[in-house]
Image (tube, rainbow, N blue to C red):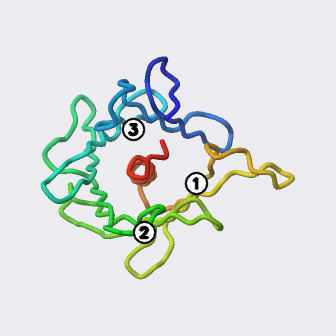
Amino acid sequence: MKSLVLGGRGCTVFDEKGKIVYRVDNYNSRYRDEVNLMDSNGMVLFTIVRKRSKLFRFWEGYRSTGTEMGKKRPGFQVRKTLRISRGDSPCQVIVGLDENQPRHYKIHGWSSKSVCEIADPFGTLVAELKRKKSACGVDLGNDVLTMVVEPHLDHSLIVGVFVVYYLINCKI
């Protein structure tokens, strides 16, 4: 992960005009068990925490209530699907846990078409990360991506889910 803060580990999300929209940082370069998703002003939107049980490891995103993290119920949970083969593993995503209206999604990594995609239970694509290309079609690098999200979804929540997917697959 690259960070805007010296000594931190994170990434930055820009809009189409080059303005910062979201930042991700953990402020502790040795551990990736907790990261913060912040808006452009540094206000924490989600605190993303790695959880461990005897059988599974999963991540939960707790929505911030402004002054403190809402540790009561997570806004989303991402669990890696068990898979024996190598490569990026698909993940199960549950959002809306804090609203008692859980909705299920799957996130998959793709090598040719896009970096990763989030689909609903019917297979309809709701969000996608692709490698950004220059005007003449040249990839701008592995860490320069473009994100497309359906307008009815909470964009900060989708960014949080993509961050967890990358943390699970050790890409950031």
Instruction: Please tell me which residue is depicted at 49% across the width and 46% down the height of the picture.
Output: 171
Regarding mark 2 in the picture, which secondary structure is present there?
Answer: loop
The answer, for residue 20, to whether it is visible in the render is yes
Q: Spot the residue most to the right.
A: 136
Q: Is residue 91 left or right of residue 53?
A: right
Q: Is residue 149 above or below residue 70?
A: below
Task: State the separation of the CA atoms marked 3 and 2.
Answer: 31 Å
The residue labelled by disc 3 is: 37
- The residue sitting at 73% across, 45% down in the picture is 140
Would you call the spot at circle 1 few (<14 residues within 10 Å), some (14-19), or many (20 or more)? many
Observer-nearest residue: 81 or 95? 81
The part of the image, by quadrant, that contains residue 143 is: top right
Residue placed most toward the observer, 166 or 5: 166
Give the percent coordinates (x, y) of residue 67: 24, 28
Within the image, what quadrant is residue 36 found in?
A: top left
Residue 115 position, x and y percent, is 58, 59
Q: Earlier in the sequence, mark 1 or mark 2?
A: 2
Disc 2 marks a residue whose amino acid type is Ser
**Circle 2 residue:** 85
Question: Which residue corresponds to mark 1?
Answer: 147
Q: Residue 25 location in percent, x, y?
A: 41, 31
Determine the secondary structure under disc 3: strand
Real-space Cα distance between discs 1 and 2? 27 Å
Q: Check contact, mark 1 vs mark 2: CB within 8 A.
A: no
Up the image or down, 148 lies above or below 143; here it is below
| Percent coordinates x, y for residue 158 in the rendering | 43, 54
